[in-house]
Image (cartoon, helix red, strand yellow):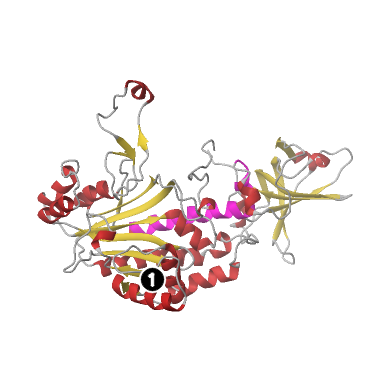
């Protein structure tokens, strides 16, 4: 059985149009009733472009009942070429072919006018029907498909690591604990030990990399941090990859660059269908600037700076214009540092070889007091990817865990990999919402996920 046509599929038929279209469905974006004819813009969410319907008026027809937001069924419509107009075709239908499937009340809030993002966020069940946020969801879908295509071309296997875990991969303690209702009252534990929602699937991903050589996943991640900003979410999606037989963090950085440029190139090739017709007034970047930014990122190699070099640059700038947090060697970079660095290069920037005290226990140590890791910083957003070469020597990772006073027994399943045909390997994690927001020119990661979860937020929707 074939499905009914979509609006997107009809635009693909422009070069070889059918005589008529049967069983078209969608929502009324706008309607204009004249004395002899009605004009309807119909959308179904598959594209930002509406189909224009022209319907002759008849005595006592149902067209006067039409209003924005209703869902319609068009039983039959004839295709008419209109090369002299903005849209090269329109559909003509008789009133009796139009049927209202779902009505809306007089108070339906999404009318044919500008709506601010703050207003749309107050409508969690309807906001995705807006042109901008609908386009953002389609853009996210395209980005995910592009990542899948890239990894397929590089012989990666997509895997599904667990969401429930007993370990804190990042060591920051920002965990959501999980327990069954029946066990809470009795104070027993369902799995026999405390269980949490994952903050990162990396540790399990390394197990699979040791079997598959190259693997990746796109999984939900959870951070119980209290940060309530436009860059943080309690529930978000993380793209993570692990690959074996790599031991140079700069090569890993360049691989990451090639991955992102693959996705950016795909977005640029499809910009006309991906970008919305207009951006909200709250956004500071125009549509032309977004496309130009994509082009600029493809034209040059992205700089790679060591953490030490980065601190020197930040300290020089701090002497002229003070940061809120003074930069000093040994401390983690703050968001203001990350944004300034990327903005000053007007390009994504890799920062490599951080002090080991700033980073997690599993990162491979360099010959000094740093580890072989990288962060990718981008203009306006800051850090969007973190990665490293993993420590593949059993004794060295055990020593590091003991130095940090970690419970080595709890992670014996992970460290024992180093005794079972160990191999040099590395990987990274990308926050999908940050990447999508930055690419799309959005100012808030909460708009890049259908239903955002954040500290003190609403969980009902």
Badge 1 local density, few (<14 within 10 Å), some, or many (20+)? many
- Indicate left or right for 355 with 67 as reference: left
Q: Is residue 196 above or below residue 51?
A: above
Q: Which residue is disc 1 drawn over?
A: 349
Q: Residue 26 location, x and y as percent?
A: 66, 44
Q: Is residue 415 magenta?
A: no
Residue 432 appears anywhere in the view: yes
Q: Residue at x 36, y 27 (%)?
A: 180
Q: Residue at x 78, y 44 (%)?
A: 94
Q: Residue at x 13, y 47 (%)?
A: 416
Q: Nearer the viewer, residue 273 or 238?
A: 238
- Indicate left or right for 270 with 181 as reference: right
Q: Residue 388 location, x and y as percent?
A: 26, 61
Q: Is label 1 in a helix, a strand or a loop?
A: strand
Q: Is residue 138 magenta?
A: yes
Magenta-highlighted residues: 125-152
């Amino acid at each position: 059985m074939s499905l009914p046509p979509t609006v997107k599929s009809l635009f693909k038929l422009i070069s070889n149009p059918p005589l008529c279209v049967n069983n078209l469905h969608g929502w009324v974006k706008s309607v204009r009733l004249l004395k002899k004819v009605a004009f309807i813009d119909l959308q179904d969410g598959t594209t930002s472009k509406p189909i224009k319907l022209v319907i002759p008026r008849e005595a006592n027809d149902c067209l006067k009942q039409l209003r924005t937001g209703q869902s319609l069924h068009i039983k039959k419509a004839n295709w008419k070429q209109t090369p002299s107009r903005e849209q090269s075709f329109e559909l003509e239908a008789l009133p009796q072919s139009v049927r209202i499937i779902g009505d809306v009340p007089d108070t339906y809030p999404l009318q044919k006018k500008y709506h601010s993002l703050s207003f749309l966020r107050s409508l969690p069940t309807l906001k995705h029907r807006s042109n901008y946020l609908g386009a953002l969801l389609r853009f996210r879908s395209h980005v995910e498909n592009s990542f899948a295509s890239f990894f397929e071309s590089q012989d990666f296997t997509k895997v599904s690591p667990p969401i429930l875990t007993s370990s804190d991969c990042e060591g920051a303690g920002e965990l959501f604990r999980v327990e069954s209702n029946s066990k809470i009252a009795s104070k027993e534990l369902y799995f026999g030990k405390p269980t949490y929602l994952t903050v990162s699937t990396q540790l399990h991903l390394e197990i699979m990399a040791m079997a598959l050589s190259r693997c990746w996943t796109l999984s939900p991640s959870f951070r119980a941090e209290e940060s309530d900003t436009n860059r943080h979410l309690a529930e978000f999606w993380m793209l993570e990859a692990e690959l074996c037989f790599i031991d140079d963090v700069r090569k890993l950085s360049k691989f990451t660059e090639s991955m992102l440029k693959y996705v950016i190139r795909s977005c640029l090739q499809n910009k006309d269908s991906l970008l919305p017709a207009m951006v909200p007034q709250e956004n500071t970047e125009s549509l032309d600037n977004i496309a130009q930014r994509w082009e600029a990122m493809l034209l040059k190699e992205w700089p790679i700076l060591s953490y030490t070099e980065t601190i020197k640059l930040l300290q020089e700038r701090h002497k002229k214009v003070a940061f809120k947090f003074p930069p000093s060697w040994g401390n983690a970079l703050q968001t203001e540092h990350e944004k300034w660095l990327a903005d000053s290069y007007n390009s994504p920037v890799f920062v490599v070889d951080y002090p080991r005290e700033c980073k997690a226990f599993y990162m491979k140590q360099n010959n000094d007091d740093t580890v072989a890791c990288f962060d990718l910083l981008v203009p306006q957003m800051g850090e969007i990817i973190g990665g490293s070469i993993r420590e593949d020597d059993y004794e060295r990772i055990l020593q590091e865990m003991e130095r940090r006073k970690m419970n080595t027994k709890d992670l014996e399943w992970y460290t024992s990999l180093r005794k079972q045909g160990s191999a040099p390997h590395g990987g990274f994690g990308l926050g999908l919402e940050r990447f999508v927001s930055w690419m799309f020119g959005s100012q808030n990661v909460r708009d890049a996920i259908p239903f955002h979860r954040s500290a003190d937020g609403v969980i009902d929707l």
